[in-house]
Image: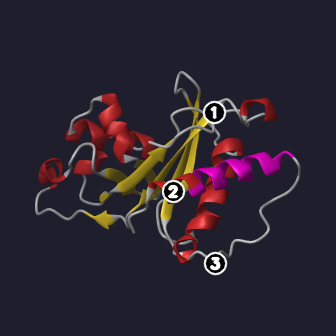
Amino acid sequence: MMLKKEQAKKLIDLARRSIKLFFSDKSIESWESKEKWLNEKQGVFVTLQRYPGRELRGCIGFPYPTLPLGKAITEAAKLAAFEDTRFTPLIEDETDKITIEISVLTKPQEMKPKNKSDLITEIEIGKDGLIAEYSGYSGLLLPQVASEEGWDAEHFLEQTCIKAGISPKSWKNKGCRIYKFQAQIFSEEKPNGNIK
């Protein structure tokens, strides 16, 4: 599903509203929407960044399409704001000092090259995100991360393994499963601002 800019704006507004409602002990009551696209199951991530420095403030999501898009956005937004263990929970004063980025994911597909070393040639930096699964551990990095960090495909694989809490070279092991996915990414230029 390809989203239009006005749909992305609705998703970002929905994410911001679910975070703000948390502080008034309210939640968005109904996940149902008359708009069909909000009820389609979709994998999503919500990323919060401090403005203006774009410093990461929280990022959580659902890699697989298990929830309707509207519900996935509201849940991921709350989790990114209050449950990302890398950060202290967001305080109310910060809600208008963060920008929200939404990544709507394609369904992850396992990469199965004949030789593990061929994984490197099957990853397109800036387009593909990665998931590494090994020995009960799992880690995910969104497509934009490799571009932002200037990584090549091999370094991206290693960093995804590190994110999973496993050795950087685990991707070469026979039992390590690597998935790739793409994402449609929308973000605010400034808090409550235009979408790019």
| Quarter where residue 113 is shown | bottom left
Secondary structure predominantly adopted by residues drawn in magenta: helix
Instruction: Choose the circle earlier in sequence order: 2 or 1.
Output: 2
**Mark 1 residue crowding within 10 angstroms, few (<14) / some (14–19) / many (20+):** many
What amino acid is at disc 1? Answer: Ile
- What residue sits 70% from the left and 33% below the top? 96
Tell me the residue that label 2 is attached to.
6
Residue 98: mark: 1
**Contact, mark 2 vs mark 1 (Cβ under 8 Å):** no
Which kind of residue does numbered mark 2 sit on? Glu
**The magenta stretch spans which residues?**
10-23
Amino acid of disc 3: Lys
Q: How many marks?
A: 3
Q: Residues within 10 Å of mark 3 (few under 14, many from 20)?
A: few
Q: Residue at x 21, y 40 (%)?
A: 154
Which quarter of the rendered picture does the N terminus lie within?
A: bottom left
At a point 65% along the width and 40% down the height, the residue shown is: 85
In this picture, residue 60 sits left or right of residue 156: right
The correct choice, above or below, for 103 with respect to 158 in the image is: below
Does the magenta run of residues contain 81?
no
Mark 3 → mark 1, Cα distance in angstroms: 29 Å
Mark 3 or mark 1, whichever is nearer to me: 3
What secondary structure is marked by label 3?
loop
For the residues bearing labels 3 and 2, Cβ distance under 8 angstroms? no
Quarter containing the C terminus: top left
Residue in front for this viewpoint, 121 or 170? 121
Is residue 9 or residue 91 the one in the foreground? Answer: 9
Circle 2: element type: helix
In this rendering, the answer to whether 135 lies above or below 68 is above
Residue 38 rendering spot, x and y as whole percentages: 57, 70
Q: Single out the mark in the foreground, 2 or 1.
A: 2
